[in-house]
Amino acid sequence: MANSHYEPPKQSVAGQLFDSIFLLILVFVALFAPLEMGLAGGGKTELAVADKTTWVGLGQNAVQQAQWEKLGMTPETAAGIITSRFDYSFDVTALIITLVVVVGYFLLLFRFSKIEYRDVIEERFGKK
Amino acid sequence: MSQTTAVHGEKISLLRVLGPGHIWALGVGIVLVGEYMGWNFAVGKGGALAALIACWFAGLLYTCVAMIDSEVTSTVAAAGGQYAQAKHIVGPVMAFNVGLYLVFAYTMLEAANAITLGYLVQTVGTMAGFEDVHDKPFIVLTIVFLAWLNYRGVYATLTFNLVLTAIAFVAVIILFAAVKPWSHELLKHGDLLTGLPYGMLGVLASLHFGLWYYLGIEGTCQAAEEVRSPARSLPMGTMTGIITLLLAATMTWYICAGLMPWEYLGQAVTPLFDAARLTESQPLMVLLFIGTCFSTMASANGCINDASRAWFSMGRDRYLPTWFGAVHPTNRTPFRSIMFLVPVAVVFAYFAPLDQVITFSILSGLLGYTYMSFNVIMFRTKWPLDSIKRGYVHPFHPIPAIVLLLLCSLTYFAVFLGYGTQLVAMMVFFAVASLWFHFHRYKFVRRGDQFTMDWPRPQGY
C-alpha cells in the first residue's frame, strides 16, 4: 500500500520566536517557582544537645573535635551544622498525590506516544 | 546514518572524529566531578554509612543503565543518544520529553559545576588573604568561556576534556595513596563513623544524592553521530567509564569518611579539597584545588556539548523551532543551541542554591532512567534479537530493566523525602510541555523523518 505523506505547515519566524520564549518561561517557572515560594528543600529539625558552646556538649569525641578545628571551626560555628537534621516525617496524602502525578505523567506520555508512533510507522512503512 | 543540515543550500553534517578515548572522557569527564562535589549531600541525608550503601545501589542502577544503553545506542547510533532512541522505539512526544530530560540534567549540572568552581576560587582566595574575592564573576566566566570553546569545535573541546579528566582522576588516586589507606595514621574511620543517624529511612533518602556519583555517564551516547566506530567505541567507552567511576567513588568515600565528621561532610561544597586540607599537606591542597577546578571545567564542558546536541537534534527534527537545528558553516558545531542554553545555565548558577540545582539535575536524570527501563523492553519486543543487527547485546534481559525500574521507584521516594515540591513541580512542567507538544508542536513534525534506521517494520505495528 502507498505511504500517506504528511506535509507539515511552515512555521513563521514570529511563531518560532513565540515557541522558544514559551518554553523558556515554562522552564523558569517550573524550576524557580518552588524556590521563590519557599517550598524547596527539606524540612529541618534541630537535634537537642547538652551544650552548644563545647565540643563535648555537642557530642563530639576527641578525633572529631580535632578535625573540626583543622577545618577552622569552633563549637559556636559548628553547632548549627551538628544539630541540623532532616525532618523525614511526611503526609501520606502528599505521597499519594506525588505518586498519582508521577504515574499519571508516564501514562499520558505513553498514550500520546502510541498515537504519534502509529503516524510515523504508517508514513515510513505504509498502512497495514 | 549521518544526518545533515542545510546551510545556504549546502548540506553540512557533524564531523566523525571521535574515538573510544574521547567517549570515555565525555562520560567520565561529565561525571567525575560527582566525586569532587555533590555526592556528599547523601551523607547529610543519611550519614556516611548510608552514603556508602547508596553509592553501591546507585552503582547497580548505573550498571543497568550502561548495559541497556550500550545495546540500544550501539544499534541506534545517531546524535541525541536516548532522544534518537525514543524517536525510533517509543514515539515523538516521548522523544521530546527525553530531549528535555537531557537538556535539563546537563544544563543544571553545568550550573552546579560553575557554582562549585566559583565557591572554590572564593575559598582559596580567602585563605590566600583576598577576603573580598567574589564567586559570581567566576561562575559567569566559566560558563561563557566553555560555551565559546564548544562553539569553536567538538574535537578541540573533547580533547581538552580528555586532558582535564585524566588529571582530575589522577589527583583522586594520589590523594588516596597519600592518606595511607593501609594505616590509621590519617584516616580515623573508627572514631568518625557514627552508624546510621536516620536509621534505614536515611539509607533510602541517601539514594537521592547517591545518583550524583555517576549521573551523566549515559552522556557517552550523545556523541554517537560524531564517533568513528559507534558499535565498538560506545560500549567500550561507557563500560570503562562506569568501572572508572565505581573505583573513584569508593576511594572518595573512603578518604572523606575517614577524615571529617559526617555532619561537616554532609554539607561541604568541596569535600575532596577539604580532605586535602585535613592532611595539612600544601602540595596535596594545591593538587586537589587543581583537580576540583579541572573536574568542574571538564564536566561543564561535556554538559554544554551534550545539552546542545540534544537541543540541536530537537530543532533539526522540528520538535523545537528549526532555527536551533543549524550547524555552524565553519566550526561544524550546533552553535545556536550552544548559545541559547548559556543564559539558562547562568541564571541558575547565579541565583539558585547548589543542592537545589543538583536536585533538578538528578530529577531530570531519574526521569530518563525510568524511560530507559521501558525503552529496552519495547525495543526487544518490537525488534526481537534475530530481527536486526545489534552492535552489542546486553545479557540477562529483562532483569536489568526490572532492577532499574525498581531502583528508580525507590529513588523517587528518596527525592520525595525532603524535596517533594521540586519533584511535583518538575512532573507538572513535563506534563504541560507534553500537552503543548502533542496539541501544538507535533503538527510541524515530518512523520516519516522520525524513523531513519534501516530496520524492518516494528512488530505490533
Image: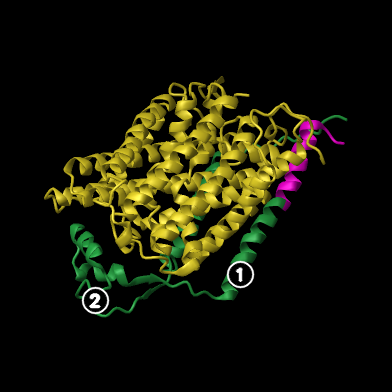
Chain colours: A green, B yellow
Chief SS of the magenta region: helix
Q: Does the magenta stretch include residue A114?
A: yes
Disc 2: which residue? A57
Horizontally, is B22 left or right of A81 in the view? right
* Residue A35 vs residue B207, the one in the foreground: B207
- Where does the C terminus of chain B fall, quadrant-wise? top right
Residue extending farthest to the left is B129
Q: Position of residue A72 (x, y in %)?
A: 18, 59
- Name the amino acid type tagged 2: Gly
Chain at numbered mark 2? A
Please give the label number shown on residue B83.
none
> Could you tell me residue B256's position as x and y percent?
32, 52
Location of mark 1 (residue): A97
B40 relative to B204 in the view: left or right: left
Left/right of residue B372 with respect to residue B201 in the rendered view: right
Question: Which one is nearer the viewer's eye here, B308 or B353?
Answer: B353
Residue at horizontal 55 percent and vertical 76 percent from the top: A91
Farthest front residue in view:
B183
Circle 2 residues within 10 Å: few <14, some 14–19, many ≥20: few
Which stretch is magenta? A111-128
Q: Which residue is drawn at 49% across and 23% down?
A: B19
B439 and A99: which one is in front? A99
* Residue B362 in view: yes
| Amino acid type at mark 1 | Ile
Residue B242: where, in percent of width, then height?
49, 39
Residues behind callouts 2 and 1 on a single chain:
yes
Residue drawn at point x = 35 percent, y = 56 percent: B351
Q: Distance between the residues labelled 2 and 1?
A: 42 Å
Displayed quadrant of residue B11: top right
Q: Is residue B333 visible?
A: no
